Amino acid sequence: MNIEMIEAAAARCAGHIRKTPLLSSPFLDEIAGRRVFVKPECLQHTGSFKFRGGWSAVSALDPDTRARGVIAFSSGNHAQGVAAAARGHGVPAVIVMPKDAPQLKIDNTRALGGEVVLYDRAGGESREEIGSTLAKERGLTLIRPYDEPQVIAGQATTGLEIAEQAAEQGIETADVLVCCGGGGLTSGIALALEARAPGLTVRPVEPEGFDDVARSLEAGGIQTNNGPQVGLCDAILTPAPGKVTFPILSRLCGPGLVVSDEDVREAMRQAFLRLKVTAEPGGAVALATALFHGDAIEGDAVIATISGGNVDPALFAQILSEGAPA
Amino acid sequence: MNIEMIEAAAARCAGHIRKTPLLSSPFLDEIAGRRVFVKPECLQHTGSFKFRGGWSAVSALDPDTRARGVIAFSSGNHAQGVAAAARGHGVPAVIVMPKDAPQLKIDNTRALGGEVVLYDRAGGESREEIGSTLAKERGLTLIRPYDEPQVIAGQATTGLEIAEQAAEQGIETADVLVCCGGGGLTSGIALALEARAPGLTVRPVEPEGFDDVARSLEAGGIQTNNGPQVGLCDAILTPAPGKVTFPILSRLCGPGLVVSDEDVREAMRQAFLRLKVTAEPGGAVALATALFHGDAIEGDAVIATISGGNVDPALFAQILSEGAPA
């Protein structure tokens, strides 16, 4: 993994991925006590940053391999990203999804042309095993959700944009808070910033109870989450940082940060109220930290990613209704 | 009004207004039966396009006049736009707002530094009279919400961006659907497109019962709405097109379009689901037309503005909950 690989991914993605804006609001600045800039990847195609990695990986395959199709296992956002990228290249995609994934993500993956295979994660089925078996049977190429260099290079294009947009805002040093599951987006952004904006420091953010990355960084080696991978922040509930991503995280990131589901819900309301964008729970952990855990970060400005916006309307309506009157 | 005046406004606004992206979704294309592109001005500073006109008008004042402050009357979005623009210039702003405006808009206007004066529109008080009186008493400059050339020139910067972004998408001819109240945004975009993208035709869109612009265009002269100016689409419930805006609309726009509140609610849900942005009711009329009234428009692509996103969370939650399960 190096900046040349990221630049090559950016070139393959040009004209296909959307350059998302950098948003801000004086109301958020006031809550946080510093300037808050938000990179809303919920506005990316398919509603999350995962389209970047999907496009990068599918476009990097040699044409004969690509023509046989791809397979992915995902709780939803990687599923949609790979399905859309495969459709954009005119090749088939099989997506292995947990039965309890948000219905919106399952429906969208199908509508984007993906052949969805459901599995029971609560019952202990392994998506990795199912994915590997299907890949062998049909000659499909497995596109891993984060532990795959071309996927990381695609997610890293987010970091190239952040570097450019931070410079436009005159920001030379700041923490960059990244919603972190397996670490694909986090390690990608960290690599891009290392080369293009070395004064910006990536800080992975996770939900309480799923803080494998924070604990791994502290311990200096991969730690795992035990128990079922089910919770509010479905997009980022991974069992452990990846074998490819962890060494990058370990080399480049500051300490990990952890937020409560309550903070996440309030951050979703603030993104709605002040930025007019939809953040899904897992996509709101970084903003939650920027707004409500300012003591854990440094500097007079902070940049927070919103990694995705694929949340069921009923849940979003419920979270909006819980808020104090505006 | 000419393109030089719009270019001058764009120069004054550069670095202050946000260039909003042009969004799309294959799901919306499928509903509409053509390619749908959305210009989400809900992502503009203050949550609506009104900041463009506010900044343009305040920045165009001579410094001595500006220093005495400005005044505006508005149901909410112009209020926030002018308040934020005045604060950005370090001058006071008095905002005359109806008592029944969405609470979020009143609160935001105050938080942005505006001195809010409430009036009773249902009881027949005239915001124009109140505004004019206060302006004289305090030496404030009245910034009209739409019938003011420098405001129109500011809104027209939206059109400059649309012209550039349409060209990037290879769109040479299309209807451009614009949420229309008094006609400031609509006439501004029409003027910009006349000069920069003459194959794009602006179509004003209004809610049922408030179709003064559509009727005026058809009649060839200004027609008014009777009855109280209260309804779901609060941002665009104006009694009649403006004296400055109507001749521009009449010269440049195609026939007006009208949508039901039910269509508006479904368009708000689609913007949430597919674009991950918040549209307020008045900001969703153009998207509603693009999605549900395709027979009234022409071409294989359509561009729809979302003019604002300042909607109370309780109403938004209610509208989301009404939708069919995703």
Image: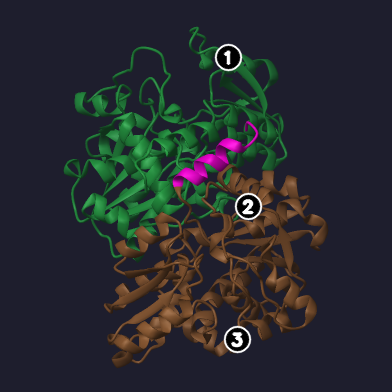
Chain colours: A green, B brown
Residue hosting label 1: A119
In the image, the segment drawn in magenta is: B313-326
Q: Point out which mark residue A90 bears.
A: none
Q: Amino acid at mark 2?
A: Ser
Q: Measured from the top left, where is residue B259 in percent x and y?
A: 71, 57
Disc 2 vs disc 3: which is toward the camera?
3
The image quadrant of residue A79 is top right
User: Tag 2, which chain?
Assistant: B
The image quadrant of residue A83 is top right
Q: Is residue A307 visible?
A: yes
Q: Which callout, 3 or 1, points to the residue nearer the camera? A: 3
Tell whether B215 sits left or right of B130.
Answer: right
Circle 2/circle 3 CB separation < 8 Å: no
Residue B308: percent from the left, percent from the top? Answer: 52, 60
Q: For the image shown, how many numbered marks are present on the structure? A: 3
> Residue beneath label 3, please?
B244
